[in-house]
Amino acid sequence: MLRKTVGSLMLLAGVYASAGENYFQTAWDAKGLLALEGAFGQAQTKQVQDNPGGGDYVLNTQTDGMGAGGLKLGGESENYRLFLSGRYHVVPDYDYVATVGAELQYLIRGGENFNIFLGINGGMMRSQATANDVEYTVTNPYLGGDAGVNFDITQNFGVELGARLNQ
């Protein structure tokens, strides 16, 4: 079962350039956002068996590298960002792992074109694996946090570097 996903939101190299505009005249002004996401990190899987006495008995724990790609749709005000997100994760030994969720981030502005964000995220994760010709499909909720920095290159394009931890 996939328990932890740690990764970068986006790792892109670029030169910081000023957009030269203030997007927000008041704290309630907002703009729509569309983000493509690439990530890498680690996935921890546990093979469990029901324990007759209650709970689960862990048979095996394995940590593998993983990659992910996703799409985020949302909005940004002067101090907050809210996204609906979907991701497809490439994890060894799984047929697929996909997540759908929401993210809320608080923005600490370091200028008109730079911010630091702290956020929470949650949603549903669905995974499928095949072992000994038997398919196992699991759907679990996840909850996590994220932090990072965002640079606005132009009014319509920015670069973000961050980390996420999900349980």
Image: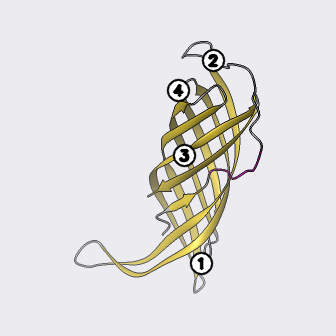
Give the distance between the C-alpha atoms of the residues marked 4 and 2, in whole angstroms: 10 Å
| Magenta residue check for 163 | no
Q: Position of residue 99 (x, y in %)?
A: 57, 54
Q: Crowdedness of circle 3 by 10 Å Cα count: few (<14), some, many (20+)?
A: some
Residue 101: image tag: 3
Dominant secondary structure (helix, strand or loop) of the stretch shown in magenta: loop
Residue 24: image tag: 2
> Seen in the image, is 161 located left or right of residue 61?
right
User: Disc 1 marks which amino acid?
Assistant: Thr
- Magenta stretch, residue numbers: 9-14
Element carrying mark 4: loop
Q: Crowdedness of circle 2 by 10 Å Cα count: few (<14), some, many (20+)?
A: some
Q: Is residue 9 visible?
A: yes
Q: Are marks 1 and 3 in contact (CB under 8 Å)?
A: no
User: Disc 2 marks which amino acid?
Assistant: Phe
Residue 79: image tag: 4
Q: Is residue 90 visible?
A: no
Q: Position of residue 110 (x, y in %)?
A: 57, 30
Element carrying mark 1: strand
Q: Crowdedness of circle 1 by 10 Å Cα count: few (<14), some, many (20+)?
A: few
Element carrying mark 3: strand
Between label 1 and label 3, give the one nearer the viewer: 3
* Near-viewer residue (3 or 127): 3
Q: Which numbered disc flags the more N-terminal residue, 2 or 3?
A: 2
Q: Which numbered disc flags the more N-terminal residue, 1 or 4?
A: 4
- The residue beneath circle 1 is 130
Residue pictured at 59% horizontal, 40% vertical: 84
Q: Which numbered disc flags the more N-terminal residue, 4 or 3?
A: 4
Between label 4 and label 3, give the one nearer the viewer: 4
Is 15 above or below relative to 62? above
Q: Position of residue 134 (x, y in %)?
A: 57, 80
